[in-house]
Amino acid sequence: MSRFTTQPDGTLHGRFEPIEADLLRLATTQLLEMLDSGADDPSLAASDGIFGRLLPDAYRDDDDAAAEFRRFTATDLLDRKAQNAQVVLNSLGSSEADTDTPDSSPDDDSDDLQPLTISLDPDAVQAWLRSLTDLRLTLADRLQITPDGVVHLLGDNTPFLRELYEWLGMLQEELVYTIDV
């Protein structure tokens, strides 16, 4: 069963376990911070490999033309990517962990937390799809995933990052399937 369902009014509902919502908030917040730093420092955007994936060269055979194109478009593209990420964060709302209720304390197991249900209009769905793509591109760069799908990063965090990458891909696939059916 898909976590996303289409509603009669044309909106889409998504359902996330609290840990999934928190993980998505964290990843999206980090993406937003990275995008903001790239918008503030164009030299960083030009030198960091992540930005190379998020803003690929428009002219692969002409470095000068590619740099000139990026100079005129990078800020607007990064702003749009940040807006998409903000839509995801707004959809997810604030973290349940940030609010204390009389029935819970920081020492609770959190097993009684209810799944989060979100509602997305068609524009928000598109923002989610674009943001999930940006998250996956960012992780692919950090994991050093080559076009053939091989992960070249070795380290303690590699299994977690790989699972996050695959989970985001699954979310994206479910979302595409839901709007395509």
Image (cartoon, rainbow, N blue to C red):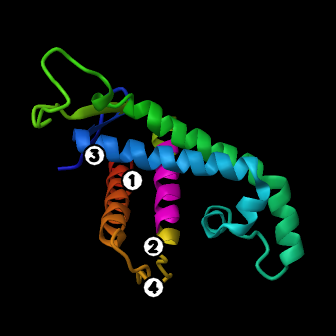
Answer whether residue 87 is visible to the viewer in this image.
Answer: yes
Choose the circle earlier in sequence order: 3 or 4.
3
Is 117 located above or below residue 73 in the figure?
Answer: above
Q: Which residue is mark 3?
A: 20
Residue at image location 25% in from the left, 20% down from the top: 100
Tell how many labels: 4
Choose the circle earlier in sequence order: 3 or 2.
3
Question: What kind of residue is marked 3?
Answer: Glu
Distance from disc 1 to disc 2, alpha carbons, whole Å, reads: 24 Å
Choose the circle earlier in sequence order: 1 or 2.
2
Q: Closer to the observer: label 2 or label 4? A: 2
Question: What kind of residue is marked 4?
Answer: Asp
Q: Position of residue 179 (x, y in %)?
A: 38, 47
Q: Which residue is mark 1?
A: 176
Q: Which residue is mark 4?
A: 148
SS for tag 1?
Answer: helix
User: What secondary structure is the magenta-colored segment mainly?
Assistant: helix
Question: What kind of residue is marked 1?
Answer: Val
Choose the circle earlier in sequence order: 3 or 1.
3
SS for tag 3?
Answer: helix
| Residue sitting nearer the eye, 90 or 11 | 90
Horizontally, residue 88 falls left or right of residue 159, namely right
- The magenta segment is 127-139
